[in-house]
Each structure stands twice: as C-alpha cells, then as structure tokens.
Image (cartoon, rainbow, N blue to C red):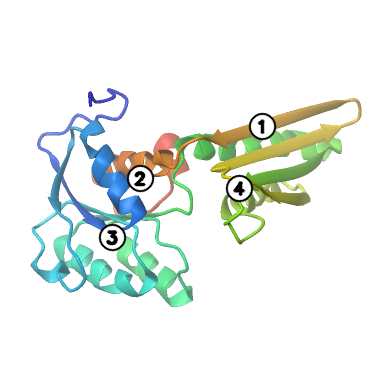
C-alpha cells in the first residue's frame, strides 16, 4: 500500500513504536495500517509478561486492558518514551497515573481517535459559543450498532461537554440499529433555522489510523497531557 503524504512526518530518524495489545482487534488494525506511516518503525509487540524484555522505543500505542496499563506506564517512564492510549474503563487511580507520567513524557488518552470527530468537536464548541447566547437549542443524536451497550456514547458525551463549556444545555438521543459503525449529529436549532454538524464513520480503521497519526506527533511533542485537538490545532 502506498503511503498517504498527509500521514508522514519529516524526522531525522524513524520513530520507534511499540504496539501494546497487538493481538486485539485494534492492535491488528494498527499493524495492518502501519505501512501508511513511513516515519514509524515497529520495534515491539509484547505479549503478556514480555514488556520488560521489549526493544527500546520512542512511543507506545496502547489498546489493551486497564490491568495491563501500569507496567506500560512504568516502562514509558524508564524509557522517557511517549504514550498514546485508547484503553477504556480506567478508574481514578489509572487516570492519576497517566497525569503523573505526563509530568515526564508526552501522553495522549482519547476515547475516540477519529481526526474528523476532533475537528467536529472544535466546531461544536465554536458554534455553541455563538448560538447559545442567542437562544438556540443543542441536541445530539448518536447511532451505533446493536451490540453497543452504553448510551449516550462516549463520543456524544465528549461533544456535549464541548457544547456545555460554551453554555449550552444539551439533550441526547441514542439509536442502536444494524451494524452502524458510528454516526453523530449535533443540531443547533433556532427560530426559523437550524444547523447540523454530522460525522459518519463507515470503517473502524479510522480509529487505528488516527492513533498512528497521533503517535507520529506525540513522539516529538513536549511532556504533558495532549489531546487530538491540541495536535490538530496547536496554539
């Protein structure tokens, strides 16, 4: 597969990447899509209990389980390596551990790695800041496959939080049907007019591709907690 120039990052040497959780569905997608990112060089895909013996790396991309995260955080601290993680179900202590690591290395955690959703999130906040004071209402409608149990989705709640930061009172609606990968509509309704911002995911590959894109940027970023928005729209 030929690489997408928009994915590539000019670096002095390849960025050594460790994929943690490579046997899972997301891990397999990361491995399959890695050739699209020539600046990334795969050096390790450690299984359970193999992390301490893994080759040196510059950035770890993690989609594993909460209980597998602490050893990875320690290894990143020892290496001075960056971390990109999409592991969910983290409790307060795990989130505190991520914050602690971010004092030493660049860290990014996200529930959704779609670059399109990150752009939409910014648009929602900007639209809400203008329209909410004018009396417009904000509704978020999300649709997913029948096997998704949480509702509203994490992405819907993230979009809602951005609208709420600008003063909106958000109402949510959720639909579970068929094999829908994911669709989110943020509607702003005023008197006689309406604006809709819509993001449709047709493939789960967008999440793996977004995580790899983040890895290329976080690997060369300063220490701290980063977001996809902060990488896309640096101050």
Along the horizontal axis of the image, is 181 left or right of 5? right
**The label number, if any, that marks residue 211 in the structure image:** 2
Residue 224: image location, x then y, percent: 35, 55
**In the image, which is nearer the foreground, mark 2 or mark 3?**
3
**In the image, which is nearer the foreground, mark 3 or mark 4?**
4
Quarter of the rendering occupied by the C terminus: top left
Along the horizontal axis of the image, is 69 left or right of 184? left
Query: Compared with residue 232, is residue 152 higher up or lower down, i.e. above or below?
Result: below
The residue indicated by pointer 4 is: 144
Q: Earlier in the sequence, mark 1 or mark 3?
A: 3
Name the residue: 29% across, 54% down: 223
Q: Are marks 1 and 4 in contact (CB under 8 Å)?
A: no
Name the residue: 32% across, 25% down: 6
Along the horizontal axis of the image, is 119 left or right of 232? right
Residue 124: image location, x then y, percent: 65, 38
Q: Is residue 234 visible?
A: no
**The label number, if any, that marks residue 21 in the structure image:** 3
Q: Earlier in the sequence, mark 2 or mark 1?
A: 1
Hey, which residue is sitting farthest front in the picture?
Answer: 178
SS at circle 1? strand
Q: Earlier in the sequence, mark 1 or mark 4?
A: 4
The residue indicated by pointer 1 is: 197
């Amino acid at each position: 597969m030929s690489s997408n120039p928009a994915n590539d990052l000019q670096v002095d040497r390849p960025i050594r990447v460790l994929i943690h959780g490579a046997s899972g569905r997301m891990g397999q997608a990361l491995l399959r899509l890695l050739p699209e990112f020539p600046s990334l060089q795969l050096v390790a895909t450690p299984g359970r209990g193999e992390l301490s013996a893994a080759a040196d790396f510059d950035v770890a991309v993690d989609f594993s389980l909460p209980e597998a995260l602490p050893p990875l955080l320690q290894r990143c601290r020892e290496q001075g390596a960056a971390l990109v993680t999409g592991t969910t179900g983290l409790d307060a202590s795990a989130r505190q551990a991520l914050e602690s690591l971010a004092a030493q290395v660049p860290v990014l955690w996200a529930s959704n790695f779609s670059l399109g959703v990150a752009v939409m999130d910014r648009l929602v906040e900007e639209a809400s800041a203008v329209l909410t004071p004018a009396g417009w209402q904000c509704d978020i409608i999300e649709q997913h496959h029948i096997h998704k149990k949480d509702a509203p989705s994490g992405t819907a709640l993230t979009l809602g939080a951005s609208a709420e930061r600008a003063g909106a009172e958000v109402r949510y609606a959720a639909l579970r049907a068929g094999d829908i990968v994911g669709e989110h509509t943020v509607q702003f309704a005023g008197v006689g007019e309406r604006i809709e911002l819509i993001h449709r995911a047709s493939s789960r590959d967008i999440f793996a591709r977004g995580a790899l894109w983040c890895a290329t940027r976080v690997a060369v970023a300063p220490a701290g907690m980063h977001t996809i928005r902060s990488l896309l729209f640096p101050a």
